Image (tube, rainbow, N blue to C red):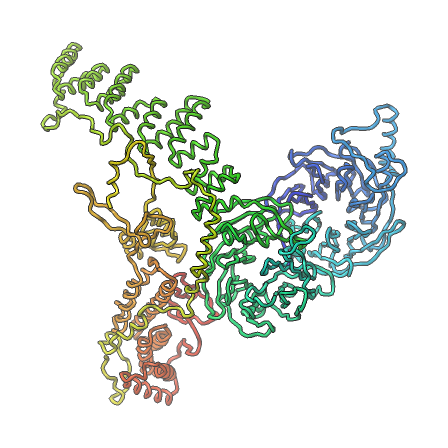
Amino acid sequence: LSIMLTKFESKSARVKGLAFHPVRPWVCASLHTGVIQLWDYRVGTVIDRFEEHDGPVRGVDFHLIEPFIVSGGDDYKIKVWDYKLRRCLFTLLGHLDYIRTVQFHPNASQFPWILSASDDQTLRLWDFQKRTCLSVLTGHNHYVMSASFHPNEDLIVSASLDQTVRVWDTTGLRKKISGEDAGSGGFDSGVAFSMGGMGGGDNSGRGNDVSGALNVQAELFGTNDVVVKYVLEGHDRGVNWASFHPNLPLIASAADDRQIKLWRMSETKAWEVDTLRGHANNVSCCLFHPKQELVISDSEDRSIRVWDVSKRVGVQTFRREGDRFWILAAHRSQNLLAAGHDSGMIVFKLERERPASALGTANKLFYVRGRELFCHDYARSSNLQTGVDVPITSLRRVGQQAQTDGIGSAPRFITYNQHNPTEGNILVSSEVDGGCYELVTFSLASSSGNVTDGKRGSCMGPAVFIGRNRFAVLDRQTRQVVVKNLNNETTKRVQPPVPSADAIFDGGSSGRIILRADDRAILFEVQSRRILNEISAPKMKNVVWSADGSKCAILCKFGVIICNRQLEQLCSVTDSVRIKSGAWDHSPTGGTAGEIFIFTTQHHVKYCLATGDTGTIRTLDYPIYAQMVVGDQLFCLDREARARVVEIDTTEARFKLALNQKKYGQVMSMVKKSKLCGRAIVAYLQTKGFPEVALHFVKDPKTRFRLALACGNIDAAIECALTLEQSAENEEEGREIWGQLGSEALRQGNHQVVEMSYQRTKDFDRLSFLYLITGDNDKLRKMLKISQMRGDIMGRYHNALFLGDAEERVKVLEESGNMALAYISAKVHGLEEMAERIQVAIETNGGSVEGLLEKVDTADKKAGCLLQPPTAIVKGTNWPTKEVVKTTLEDFEGATDDYVEEEILQQNSAIENGAGWDNDDFDDDAPKVNGLAASMDDLDLDDDMGDWGDDLDLGDDMAEPEAVVDEMADLSDMGAGAGFSLPDGGRPPAACWSTNSSHAAVHIAAGGTAKAMQLLNRQIAVSDFDVLKNAMIGSYIGSFTSMPGVPGSGSMSVPLLANDSNGHPGSESLPRTSLKMKKLVTGIRQGYRFFQGGKFNDAKNAFIKVLIDIPLVVTDSRSEANEVKEMLEICREYIIAIRLKGAISENASNPARCTELSAYFTHCNLQPAHLLLALRSAMGTSFKQKNFISAAGFARRLLELPDMSSERNADLRVKATKVLQKSEQMARNEHQLNYNESATFKIDCQKFLPIYAGESSIKCSYCGSEYSD
């Protein structure tokens, strides 16, 4: 069985009819339920549904030009649909039974015909423009199962259950309709029909009579316009399908006799050529492949088979369990097939169309076309074409298809040896028969000469070079990485770190490979056998390295992941369609080499930067496979393995790159010379914080106004606001514009513009407050008069309050009818005359002033003080702002054109300084935990043993011995015309921290506890955060310090920055954290001492404390991260050991269980000195319980310890020797134990039972402790 290359699969009712759209990525499926579905197979969505048929729809087809679909069903109806209008246009009636197939004429521009086949034993030709039946083809004496036009000639082929295939000649009908006299056949002499008239014919009475007579004759006996040319007999049972070859005079037919027959035609006769046998049930459909000499058939035996026409043998079989196949369809121009089955349909390819290729040195491209290996030299040109194809050698066919020209045997991968400058080495890998490779060696001076091949072998996935004379393959049997020399001799076998690895790719430098395993990419160093890094890469397909090896792009099925040479992810891009290929920029100038990655999809060329910026460059008419990008030229291969050069415009990508690299001179030069426009660029510049760049080339006033506000350019904003005010449709729109401008001007302290804005919007309340805070009392008095004229009581009172005018306030209260408040206000402010007058007015109206002043507290000395407006610090001029020097981005005239020269100078400087590969990050030996091993030397083994009791009692002869600048200084120099602008608002440190890191401790320090808890849950599956509460609080508090402020103010919280304390918080800012490696090391050492002294509860608490602190420790390097991982394992092992020690004490009354637990205790990964104590305890317990065989085993292990050779353990060595002698003499066990000394096992941390290899278990995602499943 072959593996089907599935592109799309749908789930639905049984599919009886299929048709591909000639241009768009659509497939139409007619279902047994009567529904017609229109699918986009590229994205896998239903575009539309048509549901007017009553019963199953068995035939469907697309028109080649018009937006029409024709369908025929069991309701005897042929319907023509317009998929743009999404409705049925008309219905053709005439058939008397189920309609099996329908088809538009392949020459759609000349013949508006529809061909239909029916169970009424006839075929019908229809003119869908006139909506009439042109001809009824009679002759079959059973159901007509299929009918189709010849793609080029005036022929129709039909298949029937009467066991015959008939070929019909439509030349007479074509001549009759087109008005031809005698002439040659074919489509060239046809006449076009107009879609304008849906009727036709002669309007005279005689014409109608003749037409009517002909229709009756046609219905009863058929017409002589279409005649039977051949009747093909040979099938033993009913024929289900027949189809023409697109070019050759061949016919293929499929029948219920489980056979496919090939027929050849001549001018006078047709005969059977061969029979293809292999199906085990009725063959439903068959067709010729439009591009290759193949026949594809499907059957009710649940299989699709592919046959070689020339060899007449089967080359591929695809089987689907549980679903019978009913229909096949082939795309006219692409290598796509569709098959309908009982539960839906499937769109697939027979073979991959991506040509195997690899980029070599000196602008050479190596690729395979057919069975030939070519070198395309871009440096040479011929016949105005870029590059010349030079054949290197012919490749041998491999696999079961080696004897045929069939499909599936083409190479899948090519790898060129970039490490060998003296000769050319190429590995050609194929997936035939599980995978194989071929090594081709040739001279670089003459690619077609001195070719050495024949060195072959089996592998899984691609084979890659890892050195000048070494390459690596993945063994498909053992899944080992096999290293071989250029003589194809195995030099080393390396077990990969993950057993599920299924492919290897180039690792970017000598000795490294990238393993693909379980949707992960693992950077693996073969020599040291260690994992350097790994990242998630779902459905990974290929790896593309930049020319300098500094970056790599991992191509996945629906995305691209950009990484550095340590495989650390820089960004990722996802797409809704499949990624076809990709290549890095190789431009020698401009600084874009290795920075812009160009990738292609089915219909687009797109770019991606390491910053995550992406965009679309251009569309494609057909898929291409990118190989190299130089400037604005994309060098690629098409699906026929022909070298192409596609023009692309990378201006947008280079612009974004220059902006991210802060090459502002280049940015402004591109703004002047390039046609950068569009909302996407403007939105991008705003998002990145560079609206002043967009301001230079945007002309729309509304957009310019928004950009001017974003970059704080008040002058440009005023200019745009005046323009927008004139073109505003209503007053409200103008008020909104000036309101936005006023808010920005107020933020910058430009109160003169704020005043103008408030005046234009007539916002009197804000205008009064502005005059208050700027100390302009004269204008405040004018505002008071304006409020009087407007009759605004509240505004008048506020202005009087701002001016400190008590008399005016009393007048306002009096005039507004608030007599009581007016009286109180007058009395409080000492205005006796006004108070008396108001009192008279109150009493005249029957009121009283008694008790009013009781509501006012007059005891306070300040109770009667008049509130005066505050004195403004700065009057008359705008508020002072910090001076900001204009950058090149703001000063358009300051942009220089010499950025290319600067790039060259920088490159030369880098070369002089010896810039190159940095290998310091990869040490051969992983560092150990600082001081952990050495800390054992500090322990006093002669201290009190605490709870380390000795259960060994051997008598007196074996008695055990006793245990042993001022930033505000320049403000006075600032004037109104000094050209100041407000700097961009900074970000608080906490916001920067949470953005710059995904570490939980950083988010806690920033106050993002909820996000930190989500990270901890996702990373190490934390569910109960109570145990982490103290550590989390400590991390938060420890990242800030408190400093006293000026007298009378509160203290200030100051962030503690870890890496950029000399600057403002930015994209690299991280906090200082309270938990450090040193604290963890101290905790581990403390646990060791407690454990050595037998204080197990204290030791357990110490190790648990370290275990809790580890998730909140931020490491500074990879070595520290490795140390933390080692500490995690240490804590786990010691906590298990301490819990086992406690269980031993609890089971003291159960000898067997106590002995078992003592045995398990010795299998914890402890320090040698602690393992010595554990073995001694287990030896004593086993000997005491008369389990002599176990005691002997513990004695042997004890004597094998290195520490036993020291002088201080001499007595214990003697004791262990005596135990071993006595135990070997007794040689029996009193109790049966669940313990196998020779087997490897893990300890169930809940039940304290062994979990042997192969037994299912559950592993803690944090510490790695295991529990039986």
Q: Is residue 509 left or right of residue 349?
A: left
Q: Considering depth in this image, is 744 or 1049 the residue closer to the camera? A: 744
Q: Where, by quadrant of the figure, is residue 1241 drawn?
A: bottom left
Indicate the position of residue 1158 as horizontal and vertical percent values.
34, 76
Residue drawn at (20%, 43%), measured in percent from left and top?
A: 1050
Q: Can residue 348 be seen?
A: no
Indicate the position of residue 450 as horizontal and vertical percent values.
67, 69
Q: Considering depth in this image, is 867 or 1092 the residue closer to the camera? A: 867
Residue at the far top: name it.
844
Indicate the position of residue 190 as horizontal and vertical percent values.
82, 37
Q: Can residue 804 be seen?
A: yes
Q: How many marks?
A: 0
Q: Quadrant of the C terminus?
A: bottom left
Q: Quadrant of the N terminus?
A: bottom right
- Up/down of 700 relative to 377, above or below: above
Q: Where, by quadrant of the figure, is residue 1260 drawn?
A: bottom left
Q: Is residue 35 left or right of residue 611?
A: right
Q: Considering depth in this image, is 890 or 463 the residue closer to the camera? A: 890
Indicate the position of residue 90 as horizontal and vertical percent values.
72, 33
Residue drawn at (19%, 41%), measured in percent from left and top?
A: 1049
Residue drawn at (61%, 61%), measured in percent from left and top?
A: 413
- Up/down of 431 relative to 249, above or below: below
